[in-house]
Amino acid sequence: MKYFGKLMMAGIVLGIVISTGNISAGELPKSNPLVKLGRGVSNVAFGPLELLIRPYDVNHTMGGIPALTYGVFSGILHTVVRECVGVFEIATFYMPLPGCSDDPLETGTWGYGPILYPEWVVDTEHNAFNFFYPKDSIVAP
């Protein structure tokens, strides 16, 4: 009797595997609720990195003195904005929002796309010491 049950279960599993062999997921959308939740948690957890990133950017474009003044204030502002957007994305991860499609040029559509650009705190331009992205990785812009 036990053998028959195991054989029956193996037959069912084999039938499911064979019947779903031609089914493919297709192209998944770039953003979904889990990506939105992860982006929100990332924004809340790593948002304070804006305090370092913004003065660094200002130093490269405008110089040292503006980095110490304008860059620091810009970092504080961007940190607050990123933290608030992160909390909002965590609170609303389960529902699409208007104007948040994957394509920023697309208007009037609902989706799980980013509210804030850049989407993640650390992007390929701010990858110090190849910590977040390996040196030889290929990342789409």
Image: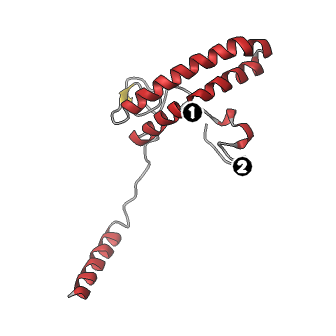
Label number found at residue 71: none
In the rendered structure, find residue 46 and report the number of the disc placed on it. 1
Q: Disc 2 on helix, strand or loop?
A: loop
Q: Is residue 8 visible?
A: yes
Work out which quarter of the rendered image holds the N terminus and state it: bottom left
For the C terminus, the quadrant is top right
Q: Is residue 130 above or below residue 17?
A: above
Task: Give the residue drawn at x 35%, y 70%.
Answer: 17
Q: Label 2 crowding class (10 Å Cα cut-off): few <14, some 14-19, many 20+?
A: few
- Mark 1 or mark 2, which has the lower sequence index? 1
Q: Residue at x 27, y 83 (%)?
A: 7
* Of residues 137 and 18, the one drawn nearer to the viewer in this rendering: 137
Q: Quadrant of residue 5?
A: bottom left
Of badges 1 and 2, nearer the viewer stands: 1
Q: Quadrant of residue 24?
A: bottom left
Residue depicted at 26% across the width and 87% down the height: 3
Question: Could you say whether the residue bearing mark 1 is in a helix, strand or loop?
Answer: helix
Residue 76: horizontal and vertical position, in percent? 60, 18
Q: Left or right of 82: which side holds 14?
A: left
Residue 123 placement, left or right of 135: left
Color scheme of the displayed model? secondary structure
| Spot occupied by residue 84 in the image (x, y as percentages of width and height) | 47, 23
At label 2, the amino acid type is Asp
Three-letter code for the amino acid on which mark 1 is drawn = Phe
Indicate which disc residue 136 carries. 2
With 38 as the anchor, is 61 left or right in this view? Answer: right
Q: Nearest the camera: 114 or 141?
A: 114
